[in-house]
Every structure is written in C-alpha cells, then in structure tokens.
Image (cartoon, rainbow, N blue to C red):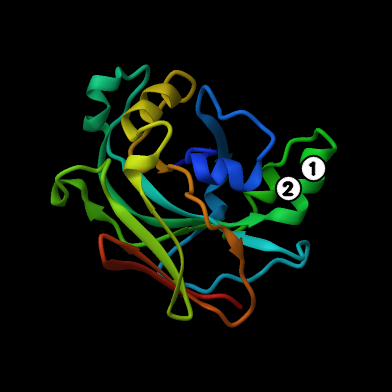
Amino acid sequence: MKIIAIGMNYVAHCHELHANENLPKEPVIFMKPDSALLKDSKPFFIPDFSKRVDYETELVVRICRLGKNIAPRFAHRYYDAVTVGIDFTARDLQQKLRSEGKPWEISKGFDNSAVIGDFVPVNRFKDVQNLNFHLTIDGNKVQEGNTRDMIFKIDELIAYISQFYTLKIGDLLYTGTPVGVGPVSIGQHLEGYLEGEKLLDFYVR
C-alpha cells in the first residue's frame, strides 16, 4: 500500500506557512512509506532528530479499487471510506531542507508520522465535500476544518494522482490540512473527530 499526501490544499493554511508564495495551481503531492503508518491508538514517540514536530490534522481517504488515469466523474467509485489522520511534520528539519533547496521527504515520511483513525464508510455521509473534522489536545480544540474548503476536491485529487501513480486497493490519501497546525509535546493526549464522532485517540510519548 502507498500513503499519498497532499500539501497546501487549504487557502488559510497556505497563508499560515507560506505567506509569500502563490497558491498552488496543481495539487502538491508527496509520499510517505508504509513504515510511516501509526494506527490502533498506539503512542507517537517524538523523534530525536527534531526539536519541533507539528500536527497536521487531515481527512484521509481509503482507496478501494485499482485505477489508472481515472476521469474526475468516475473518481468517487475508487474510495469507500474516510477517517481523520495526522500528518506529523518535523518542521525544523523541513524548513532547513527547504531553505537549502533540497527534498524534504524525511521531514514528512519518518517512521510513525502518518497517524490513522478508524474508518467510516462514505455512504454514511450525504456529501464528503462537506465534512467537519477537528483535533483536540488534552480536551482543548486546537484545529478544525471542513472539506468544502479544499482547493482541490477529493475527486480532483484522485484523478490527478492517477495520472502518475496507479492506485491500488488499500492505498491511503491524506487530503491536506486546514489552518491551525502546531507543535506537540510529550504527555499530550490527541483526539480526532469527524462530524462529531471520535475516530482517533492516542498519546505523545
């Protein structure tokens, strides 16, 4: 399985981190290895190589069919479930690599950097492009978003990605984070919600 992630997919988040850059005209894609996946409420251990690891809460889509060069109008057939996930980012390492003009995959794809919650069938929702999700830390809401605010919608993302990568059953698509990212610290309790239902629950160690 592949973990495909999208950067800069909410306008306010783009301004939050890249105030001097233009909004993307095409989806910004990066990958995480399967060793990045952290599930089943296991704790996240802050890596020794970073002094600042940020949470980025996202809607995650699960691919359910094999597909290549998928037309946008058919893209909805290629995913069957969604959940809340966190794209952990070693922000200090990312900023250093970006400033040097180097690839920054290691700041995003390190072990356990892709936290995943429990999946919910998409047929439970009237419109996947109008879903509220949020993250709490120690019971306090720290980040929230709605999928209607995506720059590139889910079906557009799937169609675009499938030009370059064959999608396979079980692949995961992290669809981007809204405004409000921030650092985590040891001992914190993170909980992620989709339409008010808790799907994600783990501690930082």
What kind of residue is marked 1? Leu
Which one is in front, 100 or 134? 134
As helix, strand or loop, the secondary structure at mark 2 comes to helix
What residue is drawn where x is 67% and y is 42%? 105
Above-or-below relation of 112 to 164: below
Query: What numbered label is drawn on residue 94?
Result: 2
Q: How many marks?
A: 2
What residue is drawn where x is 66% and y is 62%? 53
| Position of residue 149 in the picture relative to residue 23 (left or right) | left
Label 2 Cα neighbours within 10 Å, binned few <14 / some 14-19 / many ≥20: some
In the rendered view of the protein, which quadrant contains the C terminus?
Answer: bottom right
Label 1 Cα neighbours within 10 Å, binned few <14 / some 14-19 / many ≥20: some
What kind of residue is marked 2? Gln
Q: Position of residue 59 (x, y in %)?
A: 38, 50
What residue is drawn where x is 54% and y is 46%? 13
| Position of residue 172 in the picture relative to residue 63 (left or right) | right
Query: What numbered label is drawn on residue 163?
Result: none
| Residue that mark 1 sits on | 97
Q: Position of residue 85 (x, y in %)?
A: 43, 56
In the rendered view of the protein, which quadrant contains the N terminus?
Answer: top left
Q: Is residue 5 visible?
A: no
Above-or-below relation of 112 to 179: below
Q: Position of residue 73 (x, y in %)?
A: 23, 21
As helix, strand or loop, the secondary structure at mark 1 comes to helix
State if disc 1 and disc 2 touch (CB < 8 Å). Answer: yes
Q: Is residue 28 visible?
A: yes
